[in-house]
Amino acid sequence: MNATQLDTLRALLARQFAKHVDSNYILTSEEERCPYECDGLSAYRYLPLIVVLPADSAQVQAILEICHEQSVPVVARGAGTGLSGGALPLAHGVLLSLARLNQIIEIDPDNSRARVQPGVRNLAISEAAKPYGLHYAPDPSSQIACSIGGNVAENAGGVHCLKYGLTVNNLLTLQVILADGELVTIGGGGLDSPGYDLLALMTGSEGMLGIIVEITVKLLPIPERAQVAMAAFNNVEQAGQAVADIIAAGILPSGLEMMDNLAIRAAEDFVQANYPVDAAAILLCEVDGGEAEITEEIAKVKQCLLDSGSTEVQTARDDAERARFWAGRKAAFPAVGRISPDYYCMDGTIPRRHLPRVLREITEMSAQFGLRAANVFHAGDGNLHPLILYNGNNPGELERAEQFGGKILELCVEVGGTITGEHGVGLEKINQMCVQFPPEELTLFHQVKACFDPDGLLNPNKAIPTLNRCAEFGAMHIHAGDERFPHLERF
């Protein structure tokens, strides 16, 4: 479409939306639309055609019905904290913000559940449930800002996902509006539901199958006690091996996190968490449960860390110090942002036994590409978050950062892992989907999307690459002499 056609379409949609949504929440000027041009992955920016902020599910239905009639694509957006470009808008599409659907509908302590709208902040659920001795377990580092709807769309995790699972493991029911405006309920109140596991299918679908308008989550009892140990190591490979040793010892921590020296120094300078700034790496290992159980568990953790080569082990003396230890880890991303003009946040998952090798190869890649990388990740389940530091004002640095990030993801696949753990694929990792999945599986993904969204209007061109795109990406790799992934030749 040319500019005149886009202006005409914008005016048409604004008039039709205004029949259902207060005009104050229909944004058409360039100044109003600019805040929605990117998400947490700020390297890419696209100005949406129009932005609309419905107040309830009935308005969401009306918007989708209009877009379906006009064959206009729709991108849903939560708090905008996503890190894979999943909520990036389209120049010829509607940006549907769910920020106003932000009510906690019900806290049901008798059945240990909460019904919430998608715009509710992650942390707000636990705050509302706390008076009942309950909490919502998944806790992404951005939990003070990220919305539960976005958590479901990306299947977010958090520092306690090792013991308590990802978002998908903590859901009961979703209310979803399909591309044509139909409202459906997925899941149920029981531990299991008959038929296909559509709840798991919708979780992590990145807004490509439907728009989530209500969520019922599980609530868990707040542990009687939680204790965290912080261990320092002289090299990152040794810290990586300690992770495997802890799990091998039969210990199931509620959280097991790792940071390398660059991340340690950045976090310590930012929040003064009392981290050992000379350590090559630290591990934060938390166990929770009953008083007697935790006393025994934390002693086992400390001994395991020392046996694995830790030079120093500290245990939090009280809840305040425990919170401070975790504050440094949870603030690692913004902390690294203070030491570099830009950074490129990656997200891949590997088998724990390969942590030492992968960390070593990331260090080698850092030298190869001439860019620093700070490693911060959920070590317990092998979910890596390398932060590649670059300056977007320097010609070619963003491109080098992207290539560096792509190689990290391909390394994850090579060792038997996956290209994402909790950030989703979005736009950022769509080429690496060609590395992980053969054509038959990609075709199946497209067929599943077509069942829910036959016209392809919901978040198009994200997450699932076309086979043509994979053919071009595969040819590029093979031409460059990269034969680690021979299945690419089939594209």
Image (spheres, rainbow, N blue to C red):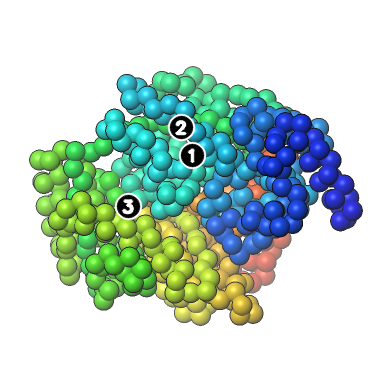
Which of the 4 quarters of the picture holds residue 26? top right
Please report whichever mark, 2 or 1, sits nearer to the chain's N-terminal start: 2
Q: Nearer the viewer, mark 1 or mark 3?
A: 1
Q: Which residue in the structure is indicated by mark 3? A: 380
* Identity, as a three-letter code, of the amino acid under mark 3: Gly
Residue 70 or 36: which is nearer the viewer? 36
Q: Is residue 464 visible?
A: yes
Position in image of residue 297 (x %, y %): 15, 47
Residue at the image position 64 percent from the left and 66 percent from the top? 478
Position in image of residue 350 (x %, y %): 42, 55
Q: Nearer the viewer, mark 3 or mark 2?
A: 2
Q: Which residue in the structure is indicated by mark 1? A: 120
Judge the density around disc 1: few (<14), some (14-19), many (≥20) Cα neighbours within 10 Å.
Answer: many
* Identity, as a three-letter code, of the amino acid under mark 1: Val
Q: Which mark is residue 104?
A: 2
Left or right of 266 on screen, residue 222: left
Residue 353 or 455: which is nearer the viewer? 455
Task: Check the image and report above or below for 389 versus 291.
Answer: below
Judge the density around disc 2: few (<14), some (14-19), many (≥20) Cα neighbours within 10 Å.
Answer: some
* Alpha carbon separation for disc pair 2 and 1: 7 Å
Q: Secondary structure at mark 2?
A: strand
* Identity, as a three-letter code, of the amino acid under mark 2: Ile
Position in image of residue 246 (x %, y %): 23, 53
Position in image of residue 229 (x %, y %): 20, 57
* Alpha carbon separation for disc pair 3 and 2: 31 Å
Residue 489 or 241: which is nearer the viewer? 241
Task: Check the image and report above or below for 367 versus 127.
Answer: below
Residue at the image position 27 percent from the left and 74 percent from the top? 277
